[in-house]
Image (cartoon, coloured by chain):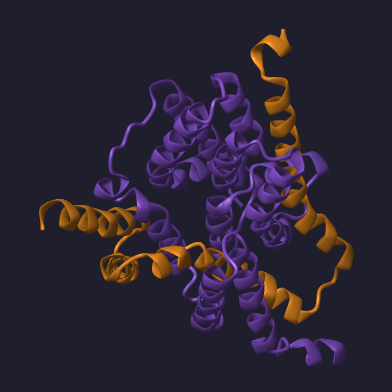
């Protein structure tokens, strides 16, 4: 196993390509916060505590509408529900850990740390806490800086389509998904999740397509799973 | 003073939102950790999380986008088979931007 320092640096190194794609998103969220009537301290505090771009966006969209606190809290919960699934998926791959280390890791959990972390856990090097924290802390610092810069300077984009901003997030997640194409039944899970998510998105709406498609894909994976082949022989021995 | 720096109502909203988000992040692992050892079907479901969940984040663009946006996603998938992550993302989005601006 690598020494901790080498693992941290390895985590920092793999974070580099992601930093470029996180940055514009953070700037947009920072601008959105200020445009919703919040001050820089509010925007900064939200980013420090949330570190979850989609729910921060939702909060800044709902805040000026004068809705009750609890309505907005439920919306934030719904948008971040995928973190429950992420947490279940990666927590056990980080074990065994001391409680403070696990809490720190889960506090920083988001889409990229899940995707890159699971890929690392599946690789021969294995996932260590130091690697995970090197990656996640880089993303955290990048997020804070980009949101603050967005809040201070403001991003004025007359037409988000002309700079491809509307497609950056979908393409980005599609490429994260493609990194898992070697997983068992990946194509089937992909198809079921995509189909259910599309139907729910059209007939019920966002953000319920995330939970519905996610759970549908997980159920299919469970149904298609085969018992571990060596279990019977282990029992005999 | 804290009250001069922050709008009290907004501060409340930020704190509650942060707590909700933290609960999401902790719940999955700490609820599941009670059920060790886990069944192979649960194991498969957890292994499926990245594909099952992240795929859903792509679908709004597929549903609301036109054929150009869908083609951009197909290009991204093909690029992912050949080039590193960042090159695939910026290649696909870059091609779309060039098309929208110049074609």
Residue at x-position 81% and y-position 86%: A234
Q: Nearer the viewer, residue A214 or A231?
A: A214
Residue B96 in the figure: left or right of residue A225:
left
| Residue B15 point in image, percent of width and height | 74, 32
Chain identifier matching the orange colour in the rendered picture = B
| Residue A3 point in image, percent of width and height | 60, 43
The answer to whether residue B5 of the structure is visible from this angle is yes
Report the quarter where the C terminus of chain A lies. Answer: bottom right
Image height of A10 relative to A184, above or below: above
| Residue A108 point in image, percent of width and height | 64, 42
- Furthest residue toward front: A66
Residue B34 in the figure: left or right of residue B21:
right
Residue at x-position 61% and y-position 52%: A1
- Furthest residue toward left: B103
Q: Nearer the viewer, residue A43 or A184?
A: A43
- Numbered disc total: 0
Image height of A76 relative to B84, above or below: above
Residue A217 in the figure: left or right of residue B17:
left
Residue at x-position 74% and y-position 38%: A69
- Chain A visual colour: purple
The answer to whether residue A8 of the structure is visible from this angle is no
| Residue A164 point in image, percent of width and height | 29, 51
Residue at x-position 42% and y-position 70%: B63
- Furthest residue toward right: B34
């Amino acid at each position: 196993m690598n020494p901790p320092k080498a693992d941290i640096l390895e985590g920092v190194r793999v974070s580099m390509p992601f930093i470029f794609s996180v940055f514009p998103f953070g700037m947009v969220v920072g601008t959105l916060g200020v445009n919703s009537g919040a001050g820089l301290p509010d925007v900064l505090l939200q980013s420090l505590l949330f570190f979850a771009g989609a729910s921060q966006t939702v909060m800044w969209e709902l805040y000026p509408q004068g809705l009750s606190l609890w309505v907005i809290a439920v919306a934030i919960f719904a948008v971040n529900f995928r973190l429950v699934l992420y947490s279940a998926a990666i927590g056990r791959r980080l074990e065994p850990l001391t409680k403070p280390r696990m809490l720190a890791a889960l506090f920083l959990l988001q889409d990229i740390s899940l995707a890159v972390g699971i890929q690392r856990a599946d690789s021969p090097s294995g996932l260590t806490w130091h690697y995970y924290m090197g990656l996640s802390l880089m993303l955290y610092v990048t997020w804070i800086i980009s949101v603050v810069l967005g809040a201070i300077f403001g991003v004025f984009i007359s037409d988000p389509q002309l700079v491809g901003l509307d497609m950056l997030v979908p393409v980005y997640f599609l490429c994260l998904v493609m990194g898992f194409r070697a997983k068992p039944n990946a194509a089937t899970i992909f198809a079921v999740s995509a189909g259910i998510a599309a139907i729910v998105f059209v007939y019920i709406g966002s953000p319920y397509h995330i939970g519905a498609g996610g759970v549908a894909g997980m159920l299919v994976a469970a149904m298609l799973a085969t018992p571990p082949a060596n279990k019977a022989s282990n029992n005999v021995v | 003073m804290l009250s001069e720096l922050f709008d009290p109502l907004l501060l409340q909203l930020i704190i509650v939102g942060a707590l909700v988000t933290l609960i999401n992040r902790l719940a999955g692992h700490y609820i599941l950790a009670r059920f060790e050892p886990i069944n192979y079907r649960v194991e498969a479901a957890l292994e499926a999380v990245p594909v099952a969940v992240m795929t859903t984040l792509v679908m709004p663009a597929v549903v609301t986008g036109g054929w150009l946006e869908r083609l951009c996603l197909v290009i991204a998938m093909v690029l992912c088979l050949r080039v590193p992550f960042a090159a695939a993302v910026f290649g696909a989005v870059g091609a779309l931007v060039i098309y929208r601006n110049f074609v």
